[in-house]
Amino acid sequence: MASTLHSFANAAELAANLADKVSGALTAAIAARGEASIAVSGGSTPKAFFQALSTRDIDWTKVTITLVDERFVPADNPRSNHLLVDANLLQNKAKAARFVPLYQPAASVEEAAKLATAKSAEIGIPFDVVILGMGGDGHTASFFPGGNNLSVALDPQTPRGVITMDAEGAGEPRLTFTFSALEDAKLLILHIEGEGKKDVLAKAKGNGEEAEMPIRAILRRATSPVEIYWAP
Ligand SMILES: O=C1O[C@H](COP(=O)(O)O)[C@@H](O)[C@H](O)[C@H]1O
């Protein structure tokens, strides 16, 4: 599917424009179905966008928020994506939203993935909005190059749900939605910032294996168009 690049002068401008775009999509979903869903990424990039979105005038009581991926750490761990969402998105008007975490306090990450799959199955499909990030190694969600479960994660036949991922570049064991759960979002965004990530994106758009740069799976095979939001 095609991708479109939206470039902004700076991160603040990007955050405001992306918050407007997402707010419009969530509001339209609520008008059409009475509810809306959004899966967001963690990492360092989305903070300003989360803060902008949290102030938007949406009927947040009808919005379910989840994560595209998470570390297998509890929500009070500084590396938790849940913590980032709590501190920056589940604030202001967005405090009224429902949050479905991927981390579950289970004995193993495999057990947590099963529990997260069951809990997230209650969210309507496809997601109304998915916001992906991208690492400098070309990973997105927790689709890491060299990941032990990468081929399963990227296989379009793998059912929607949450699976585990171990990879050298990942730090902790990870929980991630599968490609099949993310690729058909009604609004599919790739949010990246910095010249370095623009270079990584250009490389990902070139020839090469998906396993080498898993973002390629999204750029090449997502059934929804990919809206790329970039600022220096
Ligand atoms: O590990 C992760 O990293 C990516 C990118 O993070 P960033 O710090 O470079 O913005 C993120 O999209 C993913 O959700 C997160 O778990």
Image (spheres, rainbow, N blue to C red):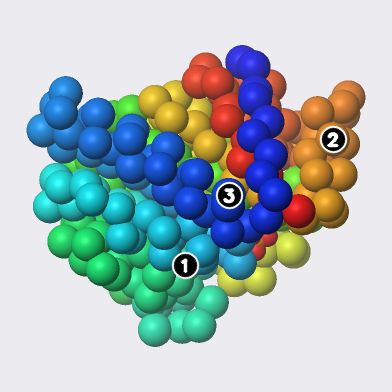
Whole-angstrom CA distance, mark 2 to mark 1, is 27 Å
- Horizontally, residue 224 falls left or right of residue 232, namely left
Of discs 2 and 1, which sits in the foreground? 2
Near-viewer residue (215 or 59): 59
Mark 1 or mark 3: which comes first in sequence? 3
Q: Nearer the viewer, residue 138 or 107?
A: 138
Residue 25 to residue 60: above or below:
above
Residue 14 visible (yes or no): yes
**In the structure shown, which secondary structural element does the residue marked by tag 3 occupy?**
helix
Where the N terminus falls, by quadrant?
top right
Question: Residue type at mark 1?
Answer: Asn
Task: Judge: label 1 CB < 8 Å from ligand 1.
Answer: yes
Q: Amino acid at mark 3?
A: Leu
Numbered mark located on residue 202 in the image: 2
Q: Residues within 10 Å of mark 3 (few under 14, many from 20)?
A: many
- Residue linked to disc 3: 14
Ligand 1 placement by image quarter: bottom right
Q: Between marks 1 and 3, how big is the CA–CA gap?
A: 21 Å
- Look at mark 1 in the image and give the residue it sits on: 81
In the image, residue 3 sits, relative to residue 106, either above or below, namely: above
Specify whether 136 is left or right of 175.
Answer: right
Residue at x 50% of width, y 20% of height: 224
